[in-house]
Image (cartoon, helix red, strand yellow):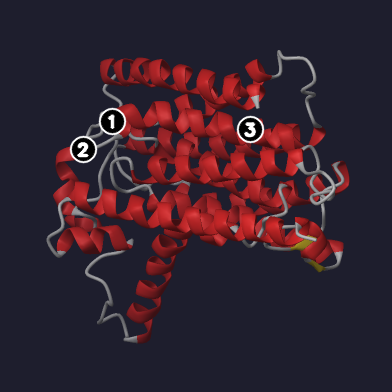
Amino acid sequence: MIAIILAGASSMLVSLFGTRYLIIFFRQRGQGQPILGKEDHGPEHHMLKQGTPTMGGVAIVGAALIGWLIAHLRRGLAFSDQTMIVWVGVLFMALMGFLDDYIKVRKRHTRGIFWKQKNYITMLASIAMAWWLVVGTGISETINVTRGAAGIEVPTAVWIVWAGMIIWATTNAVNVTDGLDGLASGSALMGFGAFTIIAYWAFRNPDIYATVVNPLDMGVFAAAFAGGCLGFLWWNAAPARIFMGDVGALAIGSALAFCALTLNTTLLIALIGGIYVMEAGSVAIQMGVFKASGRTKRLFRMSPIHHHFELIGWPETTVIIRFWLISAICVASALAIFIADFTAQVQP
């Protein structure tokens, strides 16, 4: 428990002060976020945010890595192969996001050349990381909700593709959600908090969660990311003084997916990340209705769905807080399912 607290606290402090430094650094260089305008069918009401410093996700990822490393200064906490593989995956996604952010800032447009290839690159990388987890660790190759022992056994190849799609989908869903000040970072904070609890629970009850590999190290990992999001949220809360950018969104999304996979809660992430499912789902539905109608009709005024509520009159802060509440309900429900399953196992 001390290692988890140490990781979260140190990460929060590094993120808090590191984000402040990034705000000054990017402002001095005039590197701000371009905003989609009318010509790109974007949210015109957000044009006032044009030029706000971006790539703040560097502080989240850097702080999480530092917090995770600091926690390992304590005796008894080993650097697990599984978590180190996870870090490679997260850092790769962060790099993809950073390159995309850099091109956006340099071209002063939200769509550069790189965005067209990014989805294919991240998809292939997600499947490759899932394969590495299988060949490099003893990760459970089951599709499950709360425990590997209660999951559905599938062939290795099927699990690799399934896990890769979980990583890729979650990464993109968080990226879609990152459209309002503090929405993605606040909801991610709750998700990482839930995975910290799940990981520690698995660590304390190895007989029940025997298929979870090195749960304590993953708990430290999740706590470090929770601390990173908390420190960043201080500056990212509306009105945001910096945006996380794709570097933060892709890293956070992949980190959440890796937590679900390594803790044998693959299906539970759909509830822990319920707000991301809602946001990404709204985009898919909007596109489906638009194409089915011959490009004449839309279900929402604008997607992702947070923009729809803005356009019907909700202030941005109202949308953010209400979406946070939805996220909190989803996370609490997921934890309730996890604990209920645990209780069923320990009762005589």
Question: Disc 1 marks which amino acid?
Answer: Gly
Residue at the spot of label 1: 32
Residue 323, quarter of picture: bottom left
Where residue 45 sits in the image (x, y, percent)?
14, 50
In which quadrant is the N terminus drawn?
Answer: top right
- x 42%, y 32%: residue: 102
Secondary structure, mark 1, is loop
On-image quarter of the C terminus: bottom right
Q: Position of residue 19 (x, y in %)?
A: 38, 21
Q: Secondary structure at mark 2?
A: loop
Mark nearest the camera among 3 and 1 is 3
SS assignment at label 3: helix
Residue 13 visible in the picture: yes
The answer to whether 58 is drawn above or below residue 157 in the figure is above
Q: Residues within 10 Å of mark 1 (few under 14, many from 20)?
A: many
**Kind of residue sitting beneath label 2:** Gln
Q: Which residue is mark 2?
A: 50
Q: Earlier in the sequence, mark 3 or mark 1?
A: 1
Q: CA distance from mark 3 to mark 1?
A: 30 Å
> Can the viewer see residue 116?
no
Question: Which residue is painted at 75% across and 39% down in the image?
Answer: 203
Which is closer to the viewer, label 3 or label 2? 3
Label 3 sits on residue: 221
Q: Are the residues at dot 1 and dot 2 in contact (C-beta closer than 8 Å)?
A: yes
Q: Is residue 329 left or right of residue 140?
A: left
- In the rendered image, which quarter is residue 31 located in? top left
Which x, y percent locates residue 289? 35, 80
- Pick the front one: 228 or 287: 228
Residue type at mark 3? Phe
